[in-house]
Image (cartoon, rainbow, N blue to C red):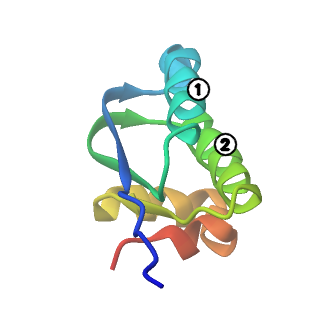
Amino acid sequence: MFLKKMKDTILKLEGNLTITSAKTIHKKMLNILEQQGNIIVDINNGEKIDISLLQLLCSLHTSCLEKKKKMIIKADDNFWGLLENTGYIKGELLSCKDN
């Protein structure tokens, strides 16, 4: 018996990733949850990031766990520094870091 590997789904977030775009980002996250496979969130081209994105990512991660999906975050060192400065580094988002 062969198990078919589900294709990962990429959510590419670019530009302004702050409270002003939170509603749009949330809709994209809800849509991507319905796709098959694991979720890769690519925020390497995010220009501005605030805590609202971190809250949305935490929510997405919780939903992924409920659906038995893995979430991977691809981001630069500035993003991971923001996590550390806001206290999220000790949370579950650190487990999503793409090494």
Residue 99's place in the image compared with 5, above or below, is below
Q: Is residue 27 left or right of residue 74?
A: right
Q: Residue furthest left?
A: 45
Classify the position of the C terminus by image quarter.
Answer: bottom left
Depth check: give the residue in front, 47 or 41: 41
Q: Residues within 10 Å of mark 1 (few under 14, many from 20)?
A: some
Q: Residue furthest right?
A: 66
- The image's mark for residue 26 is 1
* Nearer mark to the viewer, of 2 and 1: 1
Residue at disc 2, secondary structure: helix
Q: Nearer the viewer, residue 69 or 7?
A: 7
> Going 42% across and 61% down the picture, which residue do you hit?
6
Would you identify the image quadrant in which residue 69 lies?
bottom right
83 with respect to 7 (left or right): right
User: Counting other residues with Cα less than 10 Å from the Cα at mark 2, is it few (<14), some (14-19), or many (20 or more)?
Assistant: few
Q: Position of residue 36 (x, y in %)?
A: 49, 49
Q: Position of residue 9 (x, y in %)?
A: 38, 48
Kindly identify which numbered label has been placed on residue 55: 2
Three-letter amino acid code at disc 2?
A: Gln
Up-down: is 94 above or below 6?
below
* Amino acid type assigned to the residue bearing label 1 in the image: His
Sooner in the amino-acid sequence: mark 2 or mark 1? 1
Q: What residue sits 50% from the left and 17% below the top?
A: 24
Percent position (x, y) of residue 75? 32, 58
SS class, disc 1: helix
Numbered marks: total: 2
User: Residue, x 48% and y 85% (percent of image)?
Assistant: 1
Q: Residue 71, labelled with which disc?
A: none
- Identify whether 9 is placed above or below 52: below
Q: Which of the 4 quarters of the picture holds residue 91?
A: bottom right
In the image as oriented, which residue stretches furthest toward the bottom? 1
